[in-house]
Amino acid sequence: MRTIKVGLIGLGTVGGGVVEIFKNHREDFKRRAGVDIVLAAAADRNTVRFEQLGLDPAICTTDAFAVATDPNLDIVIELIGGTGVAHDVVIAALEAGNVVVTANKALMASAGQEVLGLAEAKGLDIRFEASVGGGIPIIEPLKHSLISNEISSVMGIVNGTTNYMLTRMTENGLDYDTALKEAQAKGFAEADPTADVDGFDAAAKIAILASIAFNSRVTIDQVYTEGIRSLAPSDIDYAKEIGYTVKLLAIARRTDEGIDIRVHPTMIPSGHPLASVSGVFNAIYVVGDFVGETMFFGEGAGAGAAASAVMGDVIEAARALDAGNTVIGCTCVDNLRIRPIDELQDRYYVRMVVHDRPGVLAATATAFAKHGVSVESLIQRSPGEADSAELVYVTHQASEASIREAFEEIRALDSVSEIAALIRVEDI
């Protein structure tokens, strides 16, 4: 039986989970994979982690590059994260002839073409299942099980922090600030939650999924991104009233004009399976021309889920090394156009605060009509303040550019205090 030697760089939460899997399942790997997979080297700047995880001091170092370039290793696992040192470590590992397994969504969403191209040139495998969806298998199904389909859309809830917050806001009436504090207290949100609540984490993940699904390179800077900071409890309540649920959705669609790709709060029908995904769970909804509609659901974060995906990649890479399989290189060859957000055709929920005067309703409706935006429904409510009212419009399908142009005219009206919310409505 061949022995496959693995080096692990980064012993944080996920790295600790990987070490535990090695301890608990090494003998199982022999039976399932037909190879003996050994943790032969580990690197972390925090030397306390070596003892905490019960690692043999002889395999431990603080030098990440010593592990990345070790000629005695077969596979290097990169769990540093980010696009700085992690990028250099992955490049060094590939240059040294080592297969790479990573959970680094930021790296793959920004420099995926570089690292995949280098891996292919070197005849090496690079696997990154854990970069999207935690423990949910999605990258391998897109690359293998669903490859006979033309994928028309990939969308989903891919950030557990914001999904937990929106669940609490929807089910328990919490406002944004209270939901964030609770998520931080439970360890679901970082002290600096920017990557999650502003949508950047989800943007990196949908860039990766779109690249694979549509065989065309998409980078994180090409993804239109909005977060959830501006969502008010009233918007969630209005959504319930009209039969919708608000989720931070990552959306990628193939269209005749190119790839429509974006992350933003979205109203989806409350009866859709994605609407029932609650707490820190993730779900990814894929539509193919022959398979039809499929949905992948599970825990999207946490040591166990991510470590499970990492080790799944390690086992598959070990099998491939043992069998001498040919590496599947980067398939992003179609070079499809990325559609700007102004070209989006969608329905819109708009909430505005106005002075409660005669003619305000007609003035706002006229502004929409002037720019080709047809109104489907209207709710008018008094928030309890004198001389003030809320107008809530839901439009028929319109272009994003037309909505923005109408907003410019509406904001100039003396009777309008503010346009308080704009949420896209997806009738999936």
Image (spheres, rainbow, N blue to C red):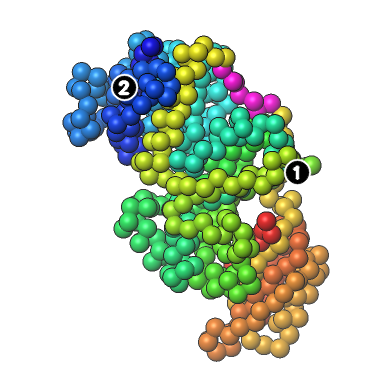
Q: Which residue is mark 1?
A: 255
Measuring from the top left, give residue 244's x and y in whole percent. Answer: 61, 66
- Image check: 370 left or right of 91? right
Bounds of the magenta span? Answer: 327-333
Measuring from the top left, give residue 33's x and y in whole percent. Answer: 43, 22
- Image check: 425 left or right of 13? right
Mark 2 surroundings within 10 Å by alpha-carbon count, few (fewer than 14), some (14 through 19), many (20 or more): many
| Quadrant location, the C terminus | bottom right
| Position above or below: 22 against 162 | above
Image mark for residue 403: none
In magenta stretch: residue 328: yes
Residue drawn at point x = 23 percent, y = 33 percent: 53
* Circle 1: residue type: Thr
* Circle 2: residue type: Leu
Q: Which residue is mark 2?
A: 39
In magenta stretch: residue 228: no
Chief secondary structure of the magenta portion: loop
| Position above or below: 83 against 122 | below
Nearest to N terminus: mark 2 or mark 1: 2
Q: CA distance from mark 2 to mark 1?
A: 45 Å
Measuring from the top left, give residue 236's x and y in whole percent. Answer: 54, 69
Residue drawn at point x = 45 percent, y = 40 percent: 135
| Quadrant location, the N terminus | top left
Residue toward you, 356 or 57: 57
